[in-house]
Amino acid sequence: MTSTIIMRAVGVCAALALSSGTGLVTAAPAEAAATTVWDRVAQCESGGNWKINTGNGFYGGVQFAAGTWKAYGGKTYAGQAHLATKAEQIAIARRVLAGQGAGAWPVCSRRAGLTKSNGKADRNATPASNPGASKTQNVTDSKKKIAKKSTQKKYSATGKAGKTVHVKRGDTLRKIAKRYHVKGGWKGLWKLNKKTIKNPNLIYLGQVLKIKETRTK
């Protein structure tokens, strides 16, 4: 965002030309599972994950910087954007759109076709006034959400399947395999996830991957 949510240098919301076996992160197609322009922006920014927090300094579906979330009244709903509901995040996004314009999301606004008109820019937007939001989305449940500790584990147990990790911005199959010492390298990681990864050169931000970690002494 302008002065707050900024363009990230590598792989921000753009599909890249990929070399074999690298699996660079790219944004999921804008039209996938998108019902409103804000869904499309979120699909581009975070893979459509409104609860994402990868530790990169940006939070939630449309990747708010902490300062932007606070400046536009987001803390009324939650300490950080990923802890708020989708409807609450869209309300703050509409305020940002009114104040900064679509350029607050330099790449993804163009990909999603975001304008002040179709994004319903409003400096006083509230969850109840969100366009296209369902009654369920408009129910404030942020008080029920407990903030996750910064030291939380990067992956969780999934029984016999091993463990899972979430793809972070800039990740590749090779980087993930190296980080978690996956047996067989990126090819081994791809083999573990062939049901969800059809093309080893293409993975998405926020995507959940199975890993079978090999500990080194």
Image: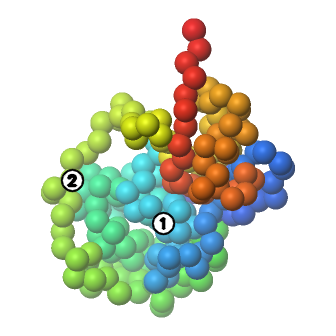
In the depicted view, which residue is nearer to us: 114 or 210? 210
Question: From this viewpoint, which residue is outermost toward the bottom?
Answer: 117
For marks 1 and 2, the one nearer the N-term is 1
Whether residue 56 is visible, yes or no, is no
**Residue 139: horizontal and vertical position, in percent?**
18, 73
Contact (Cβ within 8 Å) of mark 1 with mark 2: no
Locate residue 15 relative to residue 123 in the image: left or right. right
Decide: few, some or many residues near mark 2? Use Cα within 10 Å; few <14, some 14-19, many ≥20: few
Q: SS at mark 2? A: loop
Which quadrant: the C terminus?
Answer: top right
In the depicted view, which residue is nearer to us: 171 or 45? 171
Cα separation, mark 1 vs mark 2, equals 19 Å
In the depicted view, which residue is nearer to us: 72 or 178? 178
Question: From this viewpoint, which residue is outermost toward the top?
Answer: 217
**Residue 148: horizontal and vertical position, in percent?**
29, 42
Question: From this viewpoint, which residue is outermost toward the left?
Answer: 143
Q: Which residue is mark 2?
A: 145
